[in-house]
Amino acid sequence: MSLLLVPEVLYSDTYEPANIVSGMKKLTSSVQVALNDNHKADYYWINVLKNQQYWQRMYERKQLGEVLSDLDGFEEQMHRHLGECDELSAIVEGIGQATDGGAQVFSFAEGKLKKGHRFSNQPYLLARWEALKWSLWHECGVYVAEVSGWEQTIQHLVTAFRASYVEAHTTLRRYTVPHIPQMNKNAHIDNLMRLKGLRIGEVTAKRLVSKYETLAGVLNATETSLIGQMGNAWTTNFLKGVGRL
């Protein structure tokens, strides 16, 4: 099912919480639609630039405990979404405190601080989270907004939505983070990550090389095979980037 999405509307996915959805509707033009089912993140809107081109912005919302339980999965999801929009951000709800064995997660809602999941036997878990945030921003231009709870999520999304329509922000005359791939000892993984403009992270590169063995194997893989591994949107973006479409 395709969606007809128009500018100047802040869209939220049908699975997003009612308190966030209703809170946004009180502050701005907001509509709930099936974003996830159409290969989009949890929140989405469109800007029209001065040259009449469309600029698609997306936010993926996560709980901190959810992210810490699967950092690789979160990175993979962000890289998949990169091929589906022009600007991608994530918003992560919760507060993390380092412990001797890992991390303690807290949430803040309705004026109360609540203790959540405690991660044990992972002493460097929050350090890994900090490293992932750094790499997402500096290598892919994915901003990760950390908020205390759902009330702040509403404020952040509405503020970002409104700010994106300020004229100075629609000209794209702004500093952009250069694509500087990570290094990997496997030459095929390293070269995949260095393909300019494709934003292939280490986890994705390892997955591809594990399947296709070499850089040449990935570049020459059939479209059907790539879709089976990475999905339709990622494959389309990849094939365009390497000149096969």
Image (cartoon, rainbow, N blue to C red):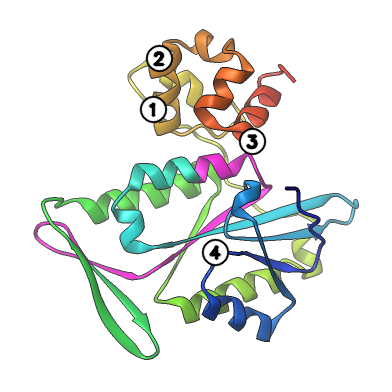
Question: Is residue 95 within the magenta segment?
Answer: yes
Q: Amino acid at mark 3?
A: Ala
Which residue in the structure is indicated by mark 4?
15
Distance (Cα) linking label 4 and label 3 = 21 Å
- Give the residue at x 58% y 54%: 41
Local crowd size for mark 3, using a 10 Å CA cut-off: few (<14), some (14–19), many (≥20): some
Local crowd size for mark 2, using a 10 Å CA cut-off: few (<14), some (14–19), many (≥20): few
Q: Nearer the viewer, mark 1 or mark 4?
A: 4
| Residue 91, x across and y down, in percent | 49, 63
Q: Are marks 4 and 3 in contact (CB under 8 Å)?
A: no
The first of marks 4 and 2 along the sequence is 4
Q: Are marks 1 and 4 in contact (CB under 8 Å)?
A: no
Label of residue 233 in the image = 3
Which residue in the structure is indicated by mark 1?
183
Distance (Cα) linking label 2 and label 1 = 9 Å
Residues drawn in magenta: 78-104
